[in-house]
Structure formats: C-alpha cells, structure tokens
Image (tube, rainbow, N blue to C red):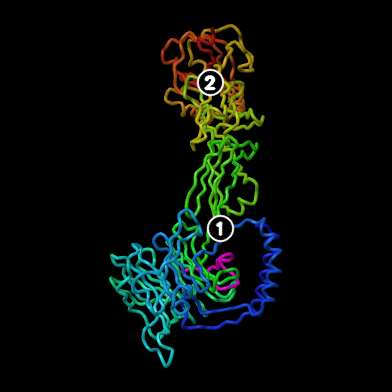
C-alpha cells in the first residue's frame, strides 16, 4: 500500500474515531447475547455528512491502492438483525430476527435459517429457509456449532424458567445440543451439564476434533464481563470449564469465539485499543499457552461492532457480522475473501544480470506450496494471496541456493521482483607427484589461472605434495600448472563445462612433474677438493700405511659419524678439512649440516680410480685402488647433497671420492 494512502487513512481514522466517541452512547442489554451487548447510533445526520466528506478523498485515493481483502454484503440480509453465520453443508446457517413481512414472530425472537451458496459465486446465495426441528420455537435459539459429521449441533437457548418478577422470565442463556434425525430435522434438545441459571453461557464453537468446546460466559472465576472459556469432552459428557486466561480475556467483554480448522481462535472484544466498540481478535495456542491476542485490523474491523468471524477450509475466505455503515439492516452478514494477484519473479545472475531460465522456484505459504520453472526470460508468474507471508526458494545448477521470506506487498510493490542468484563455487584438492611414480613433490609451486578474469592464485604444496584451492567459480574457465625449480608439469585445463556444480564435492586431481636429472660429478675435477692434487694415478695397495681417521671396522655408519664428530670438535685442522669436504658435497654449512643418517656401510669396487685424502696432514692424491685384501674394500658411503657421494675406507679411515662407472661414461 502506498505511504501517502496510509497517511491519509490514519488521519481519517483518528478524526472519525473522535467523532464516534462524541456521537455514540453505549447501552448494555444483558438479555441479547446472541448478537452483542452494545448498540450504537450516530445521533445526528450532520455527522454522517461530515464523515462522508472526510472520507471521500480517501475513497478516491484508495482506488489506486491494492485491495487486499474484498467484503460483500450477502444478499439474504434483511432490515433486521442477521448475524453469526457458520458454514454448514453446502452453505451457511445463521441467526436472524427475519423480515416482519414474512414471519409473525420476526423482530422478537432469534431463529436459525439456512441458505445454500450458489456454485461459482462468492456472494450469491439461494433464498434462506427456516431450519426444521425443535430449534425453532417461541424462544431464542442461535449461534450454532456442529460436529465434523454435521449430525450434532450445539447452540444457545434462553432458559425457559422464571428468572424473576414480571418480564425477567428466560433472560439468561444456556447451551443445548441437538441431533439430526433421518428426516433432516433437529431433535432431542439436551442441556449441557455446565450451564448455570445465574450466568450467561452462549456462543459455542467446537474444535475440529470435537473434543473441546469454546464458549462465552460471565460466570464466576472470569476476568470481568464476558470471557472465553473452554471445556473438554469426557466420554459422552463434558468436564469442568476453564477460563482461557489473560492472553485472551480482559476486564471487558469477549464474545463470539470461533476455533478454525487450523486451531486459531477468533473472537470479538470491546477492550481498550480497538478500532471500534467490538473488534475481532485472534490468538494461537501452543505448548506455552495462548498467544497474546492480535487485532485483525481493517477491513475486518471498523468503527462499528464486528463479530461472528469464521474462516472457511481454504483459509482465505469466510464470514463476519457487522453493523457498519452501508449495510441493509441492524446487523448484516458479510462474506470476506483475501484477494490474489499475479506477480512477476525475475531470476537473474547476480553478477552479470543475465536472465536465468530453467530455475526452480518454490513459493511456500501457510496454506499451500507452489512450484514454478522460470521461462526463457527468467520469469515465474505465480498467483500470490495477500496477507500471507511466503518463503521463496530458488535453485539453479551452478548457483547458490536463494531463500527469503517476503510479504505479498513487497512482491506487488514492483513491476517485477528481481531475485539475484550468486554463482556457486567449488574446491580443488590436488597432489603434485613425480612422473612415473607416486613420490610427492613437496614445496612445488602451483599456479591457478582464471582464464575468464585473468586472475592468478598461487599455492605451495605441503611436505606431502598436497595443495588446495577454495572458492573456484562454477562458470569460469581455469588452468593449473605446477613447478619445482626448473621443472614444470603439463598445463591442466579446468573448463567450466567440465565441472558438475550440482554436487557438493571437491574436484580432485594430480599434477605430475618430471623426475629431476641425476647429479653429474666430474671425478677429474680438482674442485672437488681445493687442495693440490697429483694428476697421475698412483696404485694403492697397503691401505694401513696411510692412516687418516683410523681403522673403523668395528663401527656402523652412525658410529663412524660420531668418530668424525669427535675429531671435528677437537681439532681445528680436522674441522677445516671436513667442512671443506662436505661443502664440496653440496652441504652449504659443511660438516655441521650432515647427520648420522647420511652414513651407510658399503664396499668399493677394486680397481676404481678416484681422489684419496690421507695422512694427518690431509693430503690428496689421485689414485687407483688395488687392495690385496677384500677387507680393505669395505667402506662407509656418505650421501652428498649434490650427488657427489664420498666414501671412507674402514681399514684406514681415508676418504675416497670417485664416480660410478655410469657417470664416468
């Protein structure tokens, strides 16, 4: 509804309210609880004219506003009192004092009439007929409620006993039940056990399961005036009435309760803060009790009396009674219907604003759920019902789920309601391995290139060669490549068409990097040790004559490492020599960088040519091994960082550096 319209309506309402307070007077009629306890009239016609003049701009303005609820004055209404209609069969049963031209007792007693709804017509009914049976007599009968099978009626009736002197006979009201005979006549009127001659007991309404009866009464134990009470079924009888409490009742009067098929309690009250004298309220029951009562507002309520509110099974239409201006008689029955309107829901890509066809649109309301598929223009056009909150959920492959609770007014306030979907994303979980093996490549650099946006992201593989990229957009093309030093994997393409974004799963892949080339050692390179070397190869036969670190046959690799460590720590010359040697082997920090796990036991092939370091002065010679004893071939192999492994002979502790036969070739 437009803001300007709301402002004008508020101004008119405040002015009208003030006029009504001045113009009206309230008269309490304890004998007439079938309808209401309050009658009011506008005392001077000039006030009617003034009210109309004040309201006219609003009526003209309101023509452009959304009409959320339609009201129609039902055609069977008369100039008398017609009120409290309830659904029954294919129509409604209601109370009336009728038309004096057609009934001798009309205008004096309340009677029940039935009228059938014409098919396809919201406000059209067949002529009303009197309800047959014992419920039609010279006493007041009215405000019926029915069992689910329609064969039992509970209704109000005057006590047929003297209640005092003179005309006080039968003034109080009680509840009676009646049964539907095979001849479709109501018979066997039976008084309910909790009636009390000293108090009013009226306006019954049965719960959908027939196990609870709600009614209005001013009996002892209430909060003031008429209250709403409830009583439970106990076998074929009823228990003790219970007051619904302060969430529903007040010090004023609460009348005409109606419990809907969904368990919502509607009733009328003249409490403070209403729009008129009797307004319609609702309350909902939960495990915590009855909720605070809520005024239904306009157009259900007016500045007049509004009572007898009922809801039909569809939850979107029903009946109420009002003596508001513009009616046919003292009280009229109105049909109400919450209107529908088509709205356009436009589903678009939230980034590109492209219209998205084929999106699933679910509109969930309190009564029904509607499913749509967006058309070629990205549109869904559902019929929504006003005064109902909806939860709209939209699904589209490759996009995040969109869900929001909206009101019909939000949807109807714009030409089309745009729903922007956020493109979905996925994760990549990958591994970097060597080609031809499952050996991981720790520290590899993986580059993810977004071919759509040009953005690049990097990740360094962990110690197991694993890497992860998150938030990869579903509709964008990517490629990956892994590098380690000067080696690279092949480019791995990851086009959007390859990804199934409907699955909440990570994409798993393996990038393979070539095996690193074997280190190349030049055994003739004097740079292996920066000491002078005799280039002529001398044959070595007596190893024990050239002691270096001494005989070590009784040690394993770790033990020999400890032997070198002791010499390293105790001799500057040994420390200098070992540092230089291990730096040549690729250890940047020399001997301190190596550990015992680098030493292993092995055997040197006889006849091998290489560099030998010997004597306490750490001399270097280029020699050919020509050992006489097999024992002299036993050695410790020390793994190098650059592939140039070095050996220490167990017999003498001399170092011996040589290349393998393959490397020599």
Position in image of residue 209 (x %, y %): 36, 64
Residue 567 visible somewhere in the drawing? no
Number of the label disc, if any, that sits on residue 407 = none
Q: Name the side, left or right, on which 279 lies relative to 205.
A: right
- Nearer the observer: mark 1 or 2; the answer is 1
In this rendering, the count of numbered labels is 2
Residue ranking furthest to the bottom: 165
Mark 1 or mark 2: which comes first in sequence? 1
Classify the position of the C terminus by image quarter: top right
State whether the magenta stretch is mostly helix, strand or loop.
Answer: loop
Look at the numbered disc 1 and give the secondary structure of its residue: loop
Along the line of sight, the residue nearer the viewer: 53 or 598:
53
Number of the label disc, if any, that sits on residue 387 = 1
Q: Quadrant of residue 159?
A: bottom left
Write the start and end of the magenta stretch as one range.
289-305
Look at the numbered disc 2 and give the secondary structure of its residue: loop
Q: Quadrant of residue 59?
A: bottom right
Q: Name the side, left or right, on which 528 lies relative to 595.
A: right
Residue ranking furthest to the front: 101
Position in image of residue 102 (x %, y %): 46, 72
| Label 1 packing within 10 angstroms: few (<14), some (14-19), many (20+) | some
Position in image of residue 224 (x %, y %): 49, 82
Position in image of residue 115 (x %, y %): 43, 64
Residue underneath mark 2? 548
């Amino acid at each position: 509804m437009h803001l300007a319209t709301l402002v004008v309506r508020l101004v008119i309402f405040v002015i009208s309210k003030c006029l009504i307070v001045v113009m009206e007077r309230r008269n309490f009629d304890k004998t007439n609880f079938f309808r209401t306890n309050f009658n009011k009239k506008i005392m001077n016609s000039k006030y009617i004219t003034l009210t109309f003049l004040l309201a006219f701009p609003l009526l003209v303005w309101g023509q452009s506003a959304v009409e959320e609820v339609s009201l129609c004055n039902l055609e069977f209404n008369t100039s008398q009192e017609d009120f409290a209609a309830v659904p029954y069969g294919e129509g409604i049963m209601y109370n009336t004092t009728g038309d004096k031209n057609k009934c001798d007792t009309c205008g004096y007693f309340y009677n029940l009439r039935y009228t059938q709804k014409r098919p396809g017509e919201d406000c059209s009914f067949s002529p009303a007929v009197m309800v047959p049976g014992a419920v039609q007599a010279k006493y007041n009968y009215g405000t019926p409620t029915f069992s689910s099978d329609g064969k039992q009626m509970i209704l109000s009736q005057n006590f047929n006993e003297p209640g005092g002197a003179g005309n006080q006979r039968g003034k109080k009201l009680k509840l009676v039940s009646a049964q539907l005979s095979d001849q479709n006549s109501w018979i066997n009127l039976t008084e309910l056990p909790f009636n009390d001659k000293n108090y009013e007991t009226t306006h019954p309404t049965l719960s959908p399961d027939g196990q609870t009866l709600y009614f209005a009464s001013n009996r002892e134990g209430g909060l003031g005036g008429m209250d709403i009470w409830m009583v439970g079924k106990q076998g074929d009888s009823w228990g003790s009435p219970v007051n619904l409490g302060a969430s529903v009742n007040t010090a004023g009067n609460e009348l005409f309760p109606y419990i809907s098929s969904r368990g919502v309690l509607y009733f009328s009250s003249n409490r403070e803060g209403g729009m008129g004298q009797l307004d319609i309220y609702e309350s909902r029951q939960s495990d915590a009790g009855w909720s605070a009562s809520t005024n239904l507002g306009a157009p259900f309520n007016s500045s007049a009396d509004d009572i007898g509110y009922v809801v039909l099974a569809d939850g979107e239409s029903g009946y109420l009674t009002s003596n508001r201006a513009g009616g046919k008689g003292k009280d009229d029955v109105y049909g109400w219907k919450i209107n529908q309107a088509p709205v356009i829901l436009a589903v678009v890509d939230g980034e590109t604003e492209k219209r998205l066809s084929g999106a699933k649109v679910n509109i969930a309301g309190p009564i029904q759920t509607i499913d749509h598929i967006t058309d070629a223009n990205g549109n869904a056009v559902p019929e929504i019902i006003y005064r109902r909150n909806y939860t709209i959920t939209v699904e589209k492959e490759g996009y995040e789920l969109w869900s929001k609770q909206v009101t019909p007014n939000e949807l109807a306030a714009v030409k089309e309601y745009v729903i922007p979907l956020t493109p979905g994303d996925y994760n990549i979980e990958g591994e970097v391995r060597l080609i031809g093996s499952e050996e991981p490549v720790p520290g590899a650099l993986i580059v993810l290139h977004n071919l759509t946006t040009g953005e690049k992201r990097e990740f360094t593989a962990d110690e197991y060669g694993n890497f992860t990229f998150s938030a990869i957009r579903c509709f964008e093309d990517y490629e990956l490549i892994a590098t380690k030093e000067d080696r690279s994997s092949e480019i791995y393409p990851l086009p959007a068409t390859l990804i199934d974004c409907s699955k909440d799963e990570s994409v798993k892949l393996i990038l393979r990097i070539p095996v690193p080339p074997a280190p190349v050692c030049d055994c003739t390179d004097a740079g292996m040790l920066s000491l002078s070397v005799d280039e002529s190869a001398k044959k070595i036969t007596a190893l024990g004559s050239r002691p270096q670190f001494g005989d070590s046959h009784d040690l394993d690799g770790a033990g020999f490492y400890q032997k070198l460590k002791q010499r390293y720590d105790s001799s500057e010359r040994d420390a200098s020599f070992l540092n230089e040697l291990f730096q040549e082997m690729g250890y940047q920090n020399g001997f301190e960088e190596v550990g015992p796990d680098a030493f292993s036991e092995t055997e040197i092939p006889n006849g091998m040519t290489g560099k030998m370091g010997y004597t306490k002065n750490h001399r270097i010679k280029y020699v050919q091994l020509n050992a006489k004893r097999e024992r002299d071939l036993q050695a410790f192999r020390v793994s190098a960082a650059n592939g140039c492994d070095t050996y220490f002979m167990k017999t003498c502790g001399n170092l011996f550096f040589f290349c393998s036969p393959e490397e020599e070739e």
